[in-house]
Image: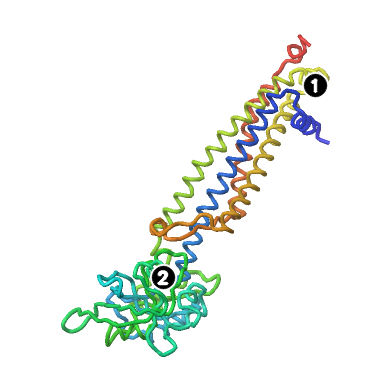
Amino acid sequence: MNLARAIAWRYLRRPTDNLVSAVGVVSVLGLIIGVMALVISMALMTGYRRDLQEKLLGGNAEVFVYSVSGMMNDPARVLGLVRGASGVQEASPVLYQHAVVTTETNRTGSEVMLKGIEPGRGKTSQMLAKIIGPRARFETASGERGVSIGKYLATKLGVKAGDAISITVAAGTQEGFLPRSGTFLVTNVFATGFYEFDARWLFVDLRDAQSLVGPGSASNLIEVKLKPGADIDRVVTDIERRTGGRYAVSDWREMNRPLFSMLRLQQRILFIVIGLIVFVSTFNIVSTLIMTVQEKRREIGILRSMGAEGRMVRRIFIWYGTMVGVAGTAAGVAFGTLICWILTRFELVSFPPEIAEVYFVSSIPFVTRPGDLAVIALFSMFVSFAATILPSMRAARLDPVEALRYE
């Protein structure tokens, strides 16, 4: 049995001075609060970044192939080349087009992004299935052209499922760019939780988009979905080689690099700032240990007079501070994880439209990763251990004669 640890545990369980006991409780509570704040803040940033990434990939793809000149001349041939690349699970043509949509209650028009996709893609993506709707196609039962619209945009335009809207695009002709309009029926009002889609995008069948834009329009982009575990850099290189460099190839990381770089920087800064709370809480541990050393002067003197070396006395108070650090860290991680689960389970961090427009999402999940919890626990234990060094050295230098002189 470790004698130093046993004595430290006895000191921790049975403090003889009420003031020392109170200070010890405060030191543990301060450490718990600091660790909880770290767990929650890291879970917030991790959950926000992961949720944003999943929604970006769910509605789009990992890799994009497009022509810098506009429409692809031979999309079928490019599709064949892209699908033959290693690591490609699915490649689908897409037509993007800026548009203006008008309704009976919004005659001035609102600028939106029109995206034409193949309805069959709803079988391979949960988000696209939610966008396309339960019918798994854009057409109505009577064969009229349909459009899926986000809930925020539907509210802004004053429409619901079954209402008609007019979509106008600028189509290129020999005379220049001329407006072309078409009437669509709202077949689905979706809510993805991704504000950009829910407030600014319209989704229609690829064939209807091609018909609206005009003759000669096929697709202006190919979205590529990768197989699980595929190396995205290798896939991009293979697609560039197969297409002979005639088309631009980009991936989601490159297109969103500034945003995710900023989020990673914010997470690091947040860890440093919140970590200061844990660091400051260790001063309570130092205070507790110094007061405990003063309280236990007689016991320390008896131990030293019985032959205990200074190293043993030092280990007693190192164990004492370490136990306080373990208790505070364990409780902080446990309570922080529980709070994150509650916040995520009941979606307590949700935003109204004006705030969701800034953060791109309507609600944020709190994701606690084992790696993050391990880093937080190690950091907390390290600073707790560092706080024990000075008081334990002071206890080890205590002269037994001075300690017992007035006893």
Q: How many marks?
A: 2
Residue 404: percent from left, percent from top: 77, 13
Q: Whole-Å distance between the Cαs marked 2 and 1? A: 74 Å
Q: Which residue is mark 1?
A: 303
Q: Which residue lies most toward the left here?
A: 175
Q: Which residue is mark 2?
A: 150
Q: Residue drawn 63% across and 51% down? A: 338
Task: Choose mark 2 or mark 1, whichever is in front.
Answer: 2
Residue 352: percent from left, percent from top: 43, 58
Q: Residue drawn 59% across and 43% down? A: 35
Q: Is residue 294 left or right of residue 254?
A: right
Q: Label 2's element?
A: strand
Q: Are marks 2 and 1 in contact (CB under 8 Å)?
A: no
Mark drawn on residue 30? none
Q: Residue drawn 67% across and 28% down? A: 22
Identify the image quadrant of residue 314: top right
Tell me: residue 396, above or below residue 227. Answer: above
**Mark 1 is on which residue type?**
Leu
Q: Is residue 222 left or right of residue 289?
A: left
Q: Is residue 367 left or right of residue 106?
A: right
Identify the image quadrant of residue 284: top right
Q: Is residue 129 left or right of residue 290?
A: left
Residue 104: percent from left, percent from top: 30, 75
Mark 2 residue crowding within 10 angstroms, few (<14) / some (14–19) / many (20+): many
**Mark 2 is on which residue type?**
Gly
Q: Label 1's element?
A: helix
